[in-house]
Structures are given as C-alpha cells and as structure tokens.
Image (cartoon, rainbow, N blue to C red):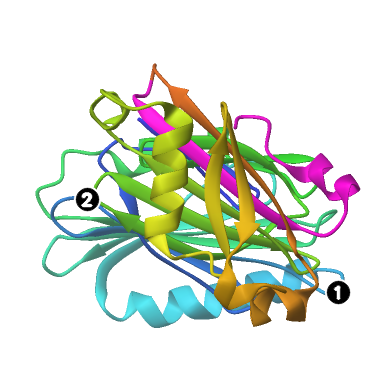
Amino acid sequence: MHTFAWNGLSFDLPADWNLASFVDDGKALRIRMEDDVSIRLELEWTISSRKINPERMRTQYERLTRSLSDQTISADQFTGLAAGWSAVLYTMHDRRRFITAMFLDQPRKLIAVFKLHFEAGSRRDPARLLDLIIASLVFRDQGILPWRVYDVAFDLSHEWRLVRTSFLAGRKFFVFEWRLRRLYVWFISLADLALKDRALSDWSADFLNQNKQIKGPVFYTDGARIKARRHGGFRFGHFEEIGRATLQYEIRSRHDTAANHIRLAVMNYRNPSDLRLFPEQF
C-alpha cells in the first residue's frame, strides 16, 4: 500500500494504483488512478458553497445507484460504515465488480464520491479495500497540507493552489499560485548520476536556464547559492512578471540522498514577507 495525498485529501490505496489524470475546473476536483492494466479509481470532491443537506445528497446518490442497478446482477448496500459514508457494491454481468461510495463532511462542507473498479479475476477484496480507504482518509483545508504521489512527497501551505503539473520519466513538475506569486517545484530522479561531477548549485542553475519554464531571468551561482538576474532582452522584466508585479526570485535546491532526488524550487514573489510560504523541504 501507499499514501496518496492531493490538495488536502489523503488516503491509502494499493501500491500499483497511481495517478493517471486530474482535472480542477474551479468547482470540483477529479482524480483518475490506474494500475498497469486498467482504471482502478475515480474520485471527485468539492467544497460546497452552502450548507450540505445530507438527505438531498443521499437522494441524489440513491438515484445514481438505482440507474446502475439495471446493468448489474446484484447491488449490495454496505452497512455499519463510519459516519458520513454510504457505499454500494455492484456485480456486473461479466463478473466485474465496482463500488460507488460517497462521503459527506458537513462541518467542512466536503462532498467526495469514489468509484472503485475490480476486474472479474481480481483477488482483491472490495470490502476490505473500501474499509482501508475509509479508515485512512483525512481531509485538511488549513495549515500545512501533504502532497504524496508516485515517489514524491512534500508539504505545502494550504494557501498555494496547484495550477499545472507535468510527470515525465524521472522528472515531476508542479506549478502553484498564491495571489499572483508562483512556486515552481521539480523532483529529479537519479540525482547521484546528475551530480557525479558537478556541484548541486551549478547543476540547478544550468537546469533552470535550459528548462525555459520560467521566462525572463538568467540563473547563476554565487558560491553555493543560486540567484537570478536580468538579461538584455528583459532588462525591466518579462511581460508576465510585470503583469503579476512579481520581479523577485528565491531559488533553493537540495540533494535528497535517501530518495536519490534533486529537489528544486523557485518562488517568484514581490515582498520579503512572501517567503514565509516557501516550503521547508527545499
């Protein structure tokens, strides 16, 4: 098993279930997870703008489950679940099984709907897996939030909002925003090879200059520190920086020997007080 944590919601799931896609449309966040064979989990959650009416939500949920019942051999309601949970196990005509489960956290106006998929020959016990998710699920909407996906783990203030990701072989990339400030985060695998003949600061500066995700500054080293300066084409800043009024950069990198990662973070900010939101792991 491993822990998946994303945007305040975290729970345990099988180690071979990994993130395949996510969509945040500003109203709800949708997660899709797959293993090497097929889709395994669909999750949608939202924070309601108004007080949750549990009866109305359960009525909508039951309407959904009734429509699915026409396509199944059996639909078995789970009983004795933790407070706020409802779930149904479906067995399809081809012997595939899946679970739909809804969780309501009324005080924090959280609504989460899970769909768990099991192949006909799956040896996993759906009820046991649902119990694991229910027992391990934690929702945080304040303070420091954990982010756990693939082999990446870091913590970040809830004030940052994820706006973009890119997951390539050996390279995980995140972009967060807070009041027009931006935080760029990279996790680079095989750090021992990248740093075999180079200092961490030199490697990091070269990586940022070649990467082109951040337009405007040129990155250079001053001893062990990494700094940014303007170059001829953008003497007064790139138009994007000027538009957001964020002309300052803080760059930090770290060699995580235990994970064999290079952790690299760049914050594009306005005032020194903004640096309180720079993640400590870097």
Residue at 43% of width from left, 65% of height from top? Answer: 212
Residue at 50% of width from left, 40% of height from top? Answer: 264
Q: On screen, 229 above or below 93? A: above
Q: Which residues are magenta?
A: 259-282
Q: Amino acid at mark 2?
A: Asp
Horizontal arrangement in the rendering, residue 98 relative to residue 57 (left or right): left
Q: Nearer the viewer, residue 11 or 95?
A: 11
Residue 120 pos. (x, y %)? 12, 55
CA gap, disc 1 to disc 2?
A: 36 Å
Indicate the secondary structure of the residue bearing disc 1.
loop
Q: Amino acid at mark 1?
A: Arg
Residue behind mark 2: 35
Q: Is residue 120 visible?
A: yes
Q: Earlier in the sequence, mark 1 or mark 2?
A: 2
Q: On screen, 41 above or below 190? A: below
Mark 1 Cα shell of 10 Å, populated few (<14), some (14-19), many (≥20):
few
Q: Is residue 116 visible?
A: no
Mark 2 Cα shell of 10 Å, populated few (<14), some (14-19), many (≥20):
some
